[in-house]
Amino acid sequence: MVQTASPEIVHPPDLADLPGSIWALASDPATGDLWFPVLGETAPPFHSLAPRIYRYSPASGKLDFWELPVEPYTGSVLDMALDGQGKVWLAWGYNIVRFDTSNLSATVYPLDENIQYPRAGASDSGHPVTALSVDSTGKVWFTRHDDAAILELDPTPGAVREHAVPAYFAAPLVAHMEIDAQGRLWLPGAVPLASDRADQLGEFDTTTGVFTLHDVPVLALTIDKGNQIWLTGGSEGGLQKLDLTAGQASLVVDVPLGGPLEDCLAADPNTGNLWLSSFGEGKIGTYRPSSGEITWYSLPIVEYDIRMYAWSVPYGTDLPSTIKVRTEVNAMAVDIDGNLWFAHGHTIGMIPAP
């Protein structure tokens, strides 16, 4: 396949060839700074670096990083959130990590010291954090892999409270959650207990503790500035909108997108426009709800060192030195100016606000 990247896409030099994959991005609405974690896994010989959190200033082009006091984790940092008080929260393996941007210090909450296993609805094989969100009071809500509970962390004492629910959460199906203006958590990819369904929509009211499982197929969701919930992953594919009148969730609009979607979806905090990625099409699109128009941006074809994939082929197989693969978007964030930042592999790119 021959595909030329859209000329609008920018790759700042300092954000190319970072020392590890990026699976989470967040933009500070106060400063415009971009925050992201890097696990420190590198190409062969796969030497390990200390886990880091990075800050990139689009205004100055300056890139800084700080090493975090956590053990290297072989999985992915699946989610992160900013709390509006200058703190970055990370779902880092079996811990939750808080990084205070005011004094550049990190606090680690080792969850296995607070939660006892096994119990009904959960295995005892390890439970990395899959998704988290911070509410207006500063409490952190999160889920853990294969766990039938939504958990609540009060950062001040470091106490964890469990809320048992009739569904469990399997990474990477629940790799993000959102909290709306009413304090309701929305979780894509919830798996009902005693069921093989793996893509339903979970709703948890943090005030009442009531959990509702909606029979709405969903892989990703976002909430726009008007508290409207948008999702991908329906039976017909595409971008869809939920109507929550009287607490009922029903699909009210379906926007075909021409290809299967990855689980990347983000809303512009100012305009309400949506950004979405389509791995099947090798593109990123921006959708304007006011007009119903979609603008597509073609992503580049990326060349990788074949040694990254050599373990998956029989020994002695004749291999080229490099392979070319379609860009896979791992994370998205929209900044205060409406620019989209997206991570793919060890690189972060940007599409200016349309």
Image (tube, rainbow, N blue to C red):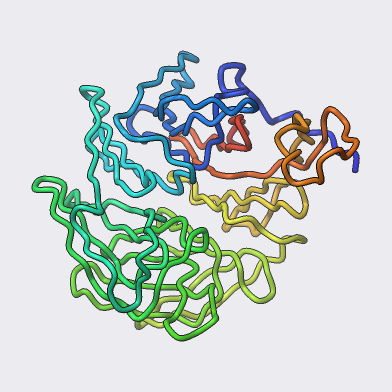
The one nearer the camera, 270 or 18, is 18
Which residue shows up at 32% across the image and 34% down it?
70
The one nearer the camera, 204 or 104, is 104
x, y (%) of residue 185?
33, 65
Does the rendering let one see residue 6? no
Does the rendering let one see residue 113? yes
Which residue shows up at 40% across the image and 58% down it?
177
x, y (%) of residue 138?
19, 48
Q: Is residue 212 left or right of residue 154?
A: right
Farthest residue, direction front: 315
184 up-or-down from 39: above or below: below
Viewport quadrant of the C terminus: top right
Farthest residue, direction bottom: 194
Quarter of the rendering containing residue 346: top right
The one nearer the camera, 184 or 194, is 194
Which residue shows up at 81% across the image and 41% down it?
315
Q: Give the total of numbered labels.
A: 0
Viewport quadrant of the N terminus: top right
303 up-or-down from 153: above or below: above
Q: Is residue 236 left or right of residue 191?
A: right
x, y (%) of residue 125?
39, 62
Q: Is residue 118 left or right of residue 313?
A: left
Q: Is residue 184 left or right of residue 280?
A: left
Which residue shows up at 76% across the image and 41% down it?
298
Quarter of the rendering containing residue 161: bottom left
Quarter of the rendering containing residue 237: bottom right
258 up-or-down from 311: above or below: below
